[in-house]
Amino acid sequence: MSHAEEAVPATARRSPPLAGVARVPGDKSISHRSMMFGGLASGETRISGLLEGEDVMRTGAAMRAMGANIEKRGAEWVIRGTGNGALLEPEAPLDFGNAGTGSRLTMGLVGAYDMETTFIGDASLSKRPMGRVLNPLREMGVQVLKAAEGDRMPLTLRGPRQTAPITYRVPMASAQVKSAVLLAGLNTPGITTVIEPVMTRDHTEKMLKGFGANLEVETDKDGVRQIRIEGQGSLTGQTIAVPGDPSSAGFPLVAALVVPGSDITIENVLMNPTRTGLLLTLQEMGGNIEVLNRRNAGGEDVADLRVRASELKGVTVPAPRAPSMIDEYPVLAVAASFAEGETLMQGLDELRVKESDRLAATAAGLKVNGVDCTEGKDWLSLRGQPGGKALGGGTVATHLDHRIAMAFLVLGLATEKPVTIDDQAMIATSFPEFMGLMAGLGAEIEVVE
Ligand code: S3P
């Protein structure tokens, strides 16, 4: 079943002040890893707050197909894993739908097994480059038996009898590539080393350590990280409370900043510093965001965010900040559309290989709604319009990209004319509760069934 066949448009209109308290679903990155590491570890893993989006469910299905027992009991997910090194050969292709993280991390995980695994996905995932993960796996001895042109899905891997440990310097800022190599290292004898010149989200390192992996991180004076993992150790089931996803929180957060008179609180948001670039940028723009009740929950910092409508001003977002807000640029562009002056976002090359070419999709969506913007090879600049008087009225092509869909619905909550997106179906991959949560805050979004 393809989402493209079921395109369901939605329209967002200028809304009254947003108000209330909301909780966004669990963090997508941590949810994928909880399913995976729980499915791999010996004994029981219990997960609360798991994101039940389509992407994470695909990862769960893949782990099940390789021998993990995964079930939902009440509000908790309970997993009995296979034990490290004991995954089974799946009988059918693993279908990852739209999920880049699930598929790339699983390629690393199964690459180190002497078995054949085939990966398939939807039209968006089948266009995304997988060579970034396959190349280090090849160095470890993994064979790519089949792949579509340009190392894309559908593709089939076959691990060697025993993978060879490597030292791999990650050539682009990508937590998925880093994680794939570390996960291959889990079932490889000796020490696999990943050198990460630019720090990306560190959930894999933190969580693998929590599950008992022998993993060390050293950071040199230039901030270059060396992550070493010793393979073939045992992993033990854990209890995990998944904090709210800061990437999902970005949508109601920006909505409250741009809809005049709004005052909302978003509870229990993950505050891991590798994920807080959007918050910092919005605060620099003059956004009134209070970080309340900072606390530690299961090894991660979380907080509640009180957000009030604000007069924003344009800023320059420097390239080194990109990894800490990589999924947030579309919604940042929406905030900047209402800011006084110019906003320049730099270092956006990785946006070209997300669920869509997000740089092009964002620029096109802005333009069709009257926002004055310029798209560069790896940058985007735009001149905002406080009040949004002449903005809106366009229909945005979402290209099977959930974040493009949500970002442009947020735009329409504060523009003079409504904003329509061509398809809202993909929102369910990461934020199935989006429509209900936004409506609960007072947002006027109509789904055209
Ligand atoms: C993710 C890493 C990022 C991010 C994605 C989730 C992860 O991708 O965009 O949504 O959980 O590791 P890249 O590794 O491609 O930057």
Image (cartoon, rainbow, N blue to C red):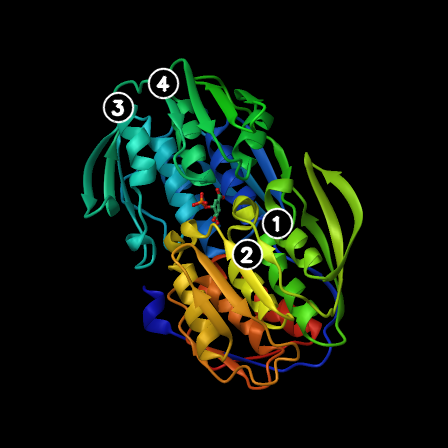
The answer to whether the residues at label 1 and label 2 have Cβ atoms under 8 Å apart is yes
Q: Quadrant of residue 259?
A: bottom right
* Element marked by disc 4: loop
Marks 1 and 2, how far apart at CA:
8 Å
Residue under label 3: 141
Closer to the chain start, of discs 3 and 1, is 3
Amino acid under label 2?
Answer: Glu
Amino acid under label 3?
Answer: Gly
Residue at (63% x, 44% y) in the render: 242
Closer to the chain start, of discs 2 and 3, is 3
Closer to the chain start, of discs 1 and 4, is 4
Q: Report x, y in % for residue 22.
A: 71, 62
Marks 4 and 2, how far apart at CA:
34 Å
* Element marked by disc 2: loop
Residue under label 1: 277
* Position of residue 255 in the picture relative to residue 330 (left or right): right
Residue at (34% x, 32% y) in the render: 110
